[in-house]
Amino acid sequence: MKISRKEVEHVASLARLKFSDEEMEMFTRQINDILIYMDKLNELDTKDVPPTFHAMEKENAFRNDEIRPSLEIEKVLSNAPADDGESFVVPKVF
Amino acid sequence: MKLAHLTITQAQDLLLKGEITPVDLVEALIDRINAYDENINAYITVLGEEALEQARSMKDTQKPDLEKHPLYGIPIAVKDLICTEGIKTTCASRILQTFVPPYNATVFDALKRAGAIIIGKTNMDEFAMGSSTENSAMGVCRNPWDLDRIPGGSSGGSAAALAADMCFGALGSDTGGSIRQPASYCGVVGLKPTYGLVSRFGLVAFASSLDQIGPMAKDVRDTALLLNVIATYDERDSTSIPREKMDYLKDLEEGLEGFTVGVPEEYFVGGIDADVENAVRGAIKLAEEMGAKVKKISLPHTEYGVAVYYIIAPAEASSNLARYDGVKYGYRYEEAKSLMDMYCETRSRGFGAEVKRRIMLGTYVLSAGYYDAYYKKASQVRTLIKRDFDEAFKECDVLITPVAPTTAFKIGEKTDDPLQMYLTDIFTLPASLAGIPGMSIPCGLDGNGMPIGLQILAAHLNESKIFRVAYNLEKAIGFERKELGS
């Protein structure tokens, strides 16, 4: 096994996901199969190969530091599940 | 010929002559959609009334000025992950089922400025994760050529809408083949442009180092016309490439004399259907007969594309999708007792199985202790894949390959085995990882009467070369666009 059920449970908590027992079994099996397939990459020696994080080499794209209009607050809040007209409202943290 | 079956170019011709109006075009599509989309499910949202209203407002204007409005009066469909102000944008996900964007994507503004009429938002795999449009919270989309088969994915709705004459042109998005593969399975044309050519401002993000918006159409000329409209530099997308505006229609009719077509041997390996191989090789022969030089080449790291992609894309997705937490927009689980409970319940109930699988995979490969073994290793192999293409384009203008090893498969055939589903992307993933442009055009039918697509690849920003080869091949192949479902 590349990954145990316990590890999958840990990853789920990192990803803020909850699973039923049955789902947990399925994901453990499937992720295991996928990770075994990924072992293929170890056939290649990449010791001196730099990683590519971006398809096109590009310098940082900076914009001028000037104030520009942004979305109005009503628009920003228009899709919020709960708001008080100024902020998003969430359940109590503690 | 029925109005809905026309290409954009043919419809424009009739508009210019004054023989039809935009209202006629919209009405023809609404008739098609009403008659046929119940079976296909290509649309998540149909904007019939809005489209008619817009078309009516165009009716009395004088002769259209195509210089200023290159898509004047043409109804276009947009994949449902491109933000449209005031129009629901669901990503085919329960978590965004009610999301109405407060702003437009840059490409959407560009379409409107060009005079296009938006006829609807198309079905897709949830968050563009999938190769079959079976992962849609809004229901499976079906292939108009055979309703028991998938249309491909993730832009399956856009491809199916085109094939069934329910739109004249469409926008899709391609992260690992999501434009090219459905175009191939549905017998239409689709282009994934160079990474950075088309602005992604307002595109719901999946894997940011790979995502690209692109045009889909009934033929090559229409595809070029759409790319002309949407390929604009945009300072709101930091990956947008500043450059001169190109006219992709300009060189279409130039011949293939002096062109070198590379044929990578790794794309014709075991597992590929004989019908697919024969059709693609036949097209390569046609290119040779038209004066192109054909050269066998090697892209030795092709076989690693699937492993690299299914590490990098889920890793980026797990980060991008962290924003769906029930706070700012979309679905929230209301019964939660605490903030943490709300996050977990909202995400677990809001996302479908494939999205969760990729978030899990991505979270794992980025987690402490595994980053070097997976994400870093994959990014290094990505460099090797990119170098393969760099070498190939030193001696070739374009490469021609199959789009996928097979034609459209049956609904449900691969849903139980995610790895088998991922392997269908084997020929489209490498170009995505390298950021180069790729196009799918139809090149024949297999023994079941399903369309076969061929893929044309070129170096960064060499879309014009792709269009030229595609246009010439399209003429030589003479693929017949059927009036499906009539």
Image: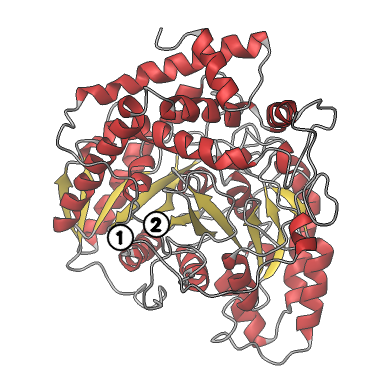
Label 2: how many residues lie within 10 Å, few (<14), some (14-19) or many (20+)?
many
| Distance Cα–Cα, label 1 vs label 2 | 8 Å
* Residue B299 location (% of width, % of height): 21, 41
In the rendered structure, the answer to whether residue B248 lies left or right of residue B29 reads left
Q: Label 2's element?
A: loop
Which residue is pictured at 66% across the width and 8% down the height? A21
B288 to the left or right of A38: left
Q: Secondary structure at mark 1?
A: loop
Residue pointed to by mark 2: B195
For residue B379, which numbered disc appears in the image?
none
B372 sits to left or right of B421: left
Which residue is drawn at the image coordinates 34% and 68% (left, top)? B464
Query: Is residue B272 in sight in this rendering?
Result: no
C-beta proximity under 8 Å, tags 1 and 2: yes
Numbered tag placed on residue B460 in the rendering = 1
**Front residue of this view, candidates B325 and B298:** B325
Q: Position of residue B476 (x, y in %)?
A: 36, 60
Compared with B193, B81 (above or below) is above
Q: Residue furthest bottom?
A: B62
| Mark toward the start of the polypeptide (1 vs 2) | 2
Instruction: Give the answer, above or below, for where B331 lies relative to A19.
Output: below
